[in-house]
Image: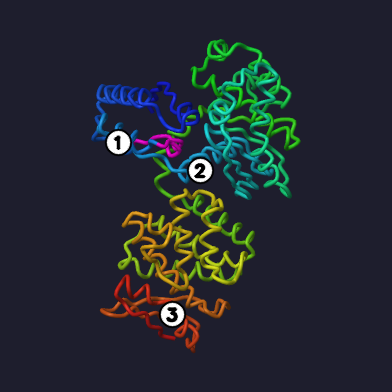
Amino acid sequence: MEFLEQPLPCARDIFSTGKVKQSTTERAVEILLGYLDSLNELGAGPKQLTRVVATNILNEAANRDVVMNRLTIGTGLPIEILDDGEMTRLVYMKTQRRLQEIPALQKKQTLVVHVGPGNTRALLFNKGKILFYASYRLGTHRTAEAIDGSLAEGEAELRLIRENASGPISRIIHDLRGHQVDELVLIGYEIQLMAPFLLKSGKRSFSLRTLKSLCREAAEMPEDQRPVSYQIDFNAAEALLPALEINAAIAEELGLKAANLATSDYERGLLYDLPATAQLTRDFEAEVIRSAQALADKFQTHTVHGKQVAYLAGRLFEETRSLHKLNEKDALLLQVAAILHECGGFVSPHMHHKHSQYLILHSEVFGLSLSERTVVALVARYHRMSPPKPLHEPYANLGHDVQIRVNKLAAILRVADALERTHSARVRDLSAQIGRNKLRLKLEGISDATAERLALQGKADLFQDIFGLEVVIQE
């Protein structure tokens, strides 16, 4: 892999002013045009590019659309912004490699903490499986800009960083209550740049005392000397102290005396995995489903009912592929929506479908971006009562293509929920025959489908409206 790098103060702009400066945008165009020249020299022109991606923190820029339009027009490249879901997948893949490198970590409950420029992700693994995942508004550049202008130096600056980060860190510790943390693995651009100063030769872990000593050393050093002393660029040097102190604070609050550090190059590792994240893997899908189930348990949903509706929805999805023409990502979102469709009962049984929408929108589901969670929330909302309407929020704010996806998935979920009307998982399996005007469902193990037929009368309407087929049952 060819790796070319140029510094750009994108994060600094966004977390200090809320938008990307015009000078930064023009510099980005200049850098990208330089990359294109290098690609041409290698014999790989723009037509051979498969993906061009921008950092996910661009989503926080108030002038995001202006910046993206300028980059596209200035370079001719089809640039896409990484969403949070894909960023999580990248961190997950990097973490899995790290766990495989050290077999001992696979046998313990290992917390992986990724302190990024704007957000911190925490993933707790038990024998390689995710027990807990959450994202917090705590980052290196976000913190650096928050304390900018304080004039604090040395120990005073470290205390200010801790005070600024104390709220999110307390939330992390609170969320992990009841979980044992045996090992800590740190991932992040700035902390991994410090590997030569934290790790002894051949070692993969370091003591908290070593990290705190490095914090004090960097804090007492003049800011303009840090790039030279640590051989890092100016942008990384600006965020260095927050990165070191935040990681040290998390380790200290967990009561740990040592931490492990990913030794591979942070950015190269992410770029190495980038081509693969467009495709879902079975392991990753399993983690998403596990996260959804954990959320359902948190909201005390009927587990057996949720799993059965998810199973029937999955079977309907497979049996009607020629109708809906949706992809594997849509199948995954349908599964998550089915598992969580009744979680709103945690708030109140009355209008629980609307409460389900709210809870899903405001909860974390591992591996799903906000846009994907929005689809899940709406599909769950429309499992009963009114079908989607143009005035409904946030349905009204979706693009037409996404609205169609929501309608298709909700139509399938409504039928699946009707087939599980008795909450007894009595439909063992189903098959579907698509006719000219009807979708005939054959239910395995059912000799009398009266209850299911009655339920379909109020729930199969959306399916008929979308696909033009009446849903009928054969026992």
Q: Residue 147's image quarter?
A: top right
Q: In the structure shown, which secondary structural element does the residue marked by tag 1 occupy? A: helix
Position of 321 with respect to 369 (left or right) is left
- Front disc: 1 or 2: 1
- Front disc: 3 or 2: 3
Position of 146 with respect to 251 (left or right) is left
What is the tally of numbered marks visible in this picture?
Answer: 3
Vertically, is 365 above or below 38? below
Viewport quadrant of the N terminus: top left
Q: Position of residue 141 (x, y in %)?
A: 53, 28
Label 3 or label 2, whichever comes before in sequence order: 2
Was residue 55 drawn as part of the magenta stretch in this picture?
Answer: yes
Label 3 or label 1, whichever comes before in sequence order: 1
Position of 53 with respect to 106 (left or right) is left
Determine the residue positioned at 49% across, 17% down. Answer: 234
Residue that mark 2 sits on: 88
Residue that mark 3 sits on: 458
Compute the Cα span from label 3 to label 2.
39 Å
Neighbour tally class for label 3: few under 14, some 14-19, many 20 plus, Cα within 10 Å:
some
Q: Which residues are magenta?
A: 52-62
Q: Amino acid at mark 3?
A: Gly
Compute the Cα span from label 1 to label 2.
26 Å
What number is the disc on residue 69? Answer: 1
Vertically, is 440 above or below 327? below
